[in-house]
Amino acid sequence: MKTLLGFLPEDVRNRFLIWLFAFTKIRMLHYIAPRFVEMTNERSVVLIRLNRRTRNHLNSMYFGVMAAGADMAGGLMAMRLIQDSGRNIALIFKDFRAEFLKRAEGDTLFTCNDGAAVRALVKQAIDTGERVNATVHVAATVPSVLGDDPVAQFELTLSLKLRD
């Protein structure tokens, strides 16, 4: 797919591939329409807008939508690193822990800075051929309302296994 879309700028190609993945595999992600603000091998930042589809009865972001944002921030970084490895590696989250600190009353950023740990996990999965696990951390912020103060913090255990 990368070769077919090689003429597109990387950010446009990433947006299209995320849209395609969400549309074909996880329809809820397509419905809430997350956007990537930043995607590198070290860090991923996902934006989910507070709107009719994502808010609850208190006009703050629904906790299920926040869980999806954390999933995307941690999971798509891992997917990118797996794709870069050129190997067939199965990715799943083994568990999920969330701490909701404040209400998310605006557009919310989900940030994962665990690229080095995920890269090491991908290498370990390739080297051992066994299922390997690591915890990734995601912080949710609402810059327009609270600046850099987190509204939620997430810990997701990423589980990888080589399928070659």
Image (cartoon, rainbow, N blue to C red):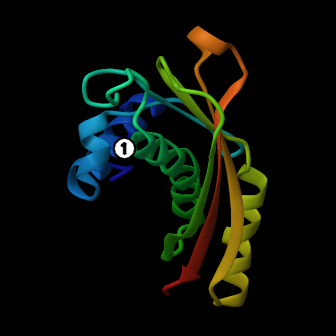
Query: Which residue sits at x=58%, y=58%?
Result: 78
Whole-percent x and y of residue 37? 53, 26
Whole-percent x and y of residue 162? 56, 83
Q: Nearer the viewer, residue 78 or 111?
A: 111
**Residue 39 visible to an observer of this rendering:** no
Which residue, as the protein is rendered here, is positioned at the far top?
144
Mark 1 is on which residue type?
Ile
Q: What residue sits right under mark 1 in the picture?
A: 18
Q: From the viewer's perspective, tell me whether residue 13 is left or right of residue 160.
A: left
Query: Which residue sits at x=24%, y=39%?
Result: 31
Query: Which residue sits at x=68%, y=13%?
Result: 147
Whole-percent x and y of residue 59? 38, 20
**Residue 152 visible to an observer of this rendering:** yes
How crowded pointer 1 is (Cα within 10 Å; few <14, some 14-19, many 20+) is rated as many
Query: Which residue sits at x=47%, y=33%?
Result: 10
Q: From the viewer's perspective, tell me whether residue 86 is left or right of residue 14.
A: right
Residue 140 appears in which quarter of the rendering? top right
